[in-house]
Image (spheres, grey):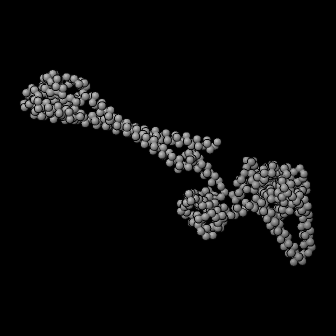
Amino acid sequence: MERRRRQRGLGQIFLRLLVWTCLAWLALLGVTLSLTLNQALSNLTEKMESDLTATAASLAGSRMVREALEQGRCPAALAEYLDALVDVTPDLDVLTVARADSVRIYHVVPERIGQLFVGGDQGRALAGEAYLSEGVGTMGRQRRAFCPVFDGNGQVAGFVMASATMDRIQIMRREIVAVYLRLAAVLALATLAAAGGLTLLLRRLLHGFSPEELVRTYLTQNEVLGDLDEGIIAADSQGVVQLVNRAAEAMLGQRAERLEGEQLDKLLRDEAGGSLLEKRRENARTSRPNILCTAVPQEEGGRRTGATLILKDRSEAMRRAEQLNGTRHVVSALRANTHEFMNKLQVISGLLQMDRTEEAKAYIGAISAVQSKLVAPVLQHIRNANTAALLLGKIDHMRELDIQPTLLANSSLPEHSAYLSTEELVTVVGNLLENAIEAVDAQNGDRPRSVVAQITEDGTGLLIIVSDTGTGIPPEDLERIYTPGFSTKAPEGRGVGMSLVGEIVARRGGSIEADSEAGAGTTFTLIFNRKRGGAEG
């Protein structure tokens, strides 16, 4: 259905394109033909009038015509010559030679010889002027050329009138118009054919997409490419960079305007050998060790047209992978635990070397008390090994920062949670504790520095609470803390931790509530009531 609708829409668009193209060409053709037709008709009139004037002037200057007017009659030889002239001259319909008293001595119709000239427009010729006029004679309305004939004394002996009937002129005009109409029809058909061919060519070049769809697709793809975390570089068959998105700009440290037009090999060289344009390469080694590159060659009709490179920041990829599976939190916790343990051993070693045995015993006793107060509850109530290791590491880290850690006595977590996988537990608890520690460490003044946690699971659900006395979260940011990329921390914070927590809560059908007061602290409460399938560790 969608395909038919799209094709119908495309057909309408290209039909409109065809119609408007034809209308534009036909309008231009009509204007051009109108101008040339008017010019042709004007040229026809000018030529006809010029021929009539030349004929009348030539005869008026003829000795035979002058003598005939002086004699008052037209000799047979002159009459035959004038008859022949009328027959061979296409634009000449009427030829008249008249005396000064307007009596004809020659007319194309012999019966009218000896009669007075008809029309009344000969007065200027009898006054000695040559001119053109329109008049109605015995053969209808005519376009006439008059020319006076002078005798030997310079007096007007008569005149010569050469004319073409208006009927003949209209016939000649219609013939020219008919020629132009035929030409217009041929050109109109040619225009339709050219417009149709152009439309089909455009449709083929656009691969069946309408211009509106192409613009919309370009803008959408541009936005999508710009928002990708992966870098995208597109190069042509010669290896010249054509497109670079924002992520690739950041990885390469240059603006797209400088990168586009450069040779691909200057930006990224395949150290494994060969060109990145030759064949598909997964995670190719490049001259930039922090960048992973996937090269995807582009082909059309069996011909190589270029390649698209997908770039990934190796360090960022590893950081995100660690956050996704909770490894970073566990490793960080174990590192802190090891660091704290080594510090204690060094203190004990130093006291023993100084023969201060009693003080060493007292120090060991204090450590045991702390172990009993802080560590023992974790080992006793948190049976999930990774989560316990995480809590122990975070507790030691908090003690180093002079933050009072507390795991509430009613905490209880089995070896395998029925609601979250181990990786999900580590991700959720690790991110919440890490954010709490950073918030407390960032607060100034003499206010209490503490982080309280509770992890309780029973047959009805799993409850996770983390509360701190840190800087708090501004009210306007509370709804945004689960958005990927948003962070209230320094610029290096990428806003991934809480977004992962939000994703896990949504995926497991749980709920999360944040209660925060600026300058007083924050409490996160998470509840999971829907059991997961399987028994992941």
- Front residue (pair 76, 31): 76
Does residue 204 appear to the left or right of 515 in the view shown?
Answer: left
Q: Is residue 169 left or right of residue 227?
A: left
Q: Quadrant of the C terminus?
A: bottom right
Residue, x 17% and y 31% (percent of image)? 83
The image quadrant that residue 70 belongs to is top left
**Residue at left 25%, top 28%?**
165
- Please name whichever residue, 502 or 93, is drawn nearer the observer in this view of the structure: 93
Up-down relation of residue 348 to residue 327 (above or below): below
| 282 on left or right of 506 | left
Determine if residue 535 is in view.
Answer: yes
Q: Quadrant of residue 225?
A: bottom right
User: Does residue 124 appear anywhere in the picture?
Assistant: no
Residue depicted at x 86% and y 60%? 384
Task: Give percent across and percent down for residue 524.
Answer: 81, 51
Q: Residue at x 49, y 39 (%)?
A: 19
Q: Position of residue 102 (x, y in %)?
A: 14, 23
Q: Nearer the viewer, residue 176 or 213?
A: 176
Front position in the image: 324 or 127: 127
Q: Position of residue 394 (x, y in %)?
A: 82, 62
Q: Quadrant of residue 302?
A: bottom right
For the N terminus, the image quarter is: top right
Left or right: 186 in relation to 219: left
Q: Is residue 327 above or below residue 347?
A: above
Question: Which x, y percent locates residue 411?
Answer: 89, 56
Q: From what the image shows, is residue 275 above or below residue 356?
A: above
Judged from this view, the residue extending furthest toward the top is 115
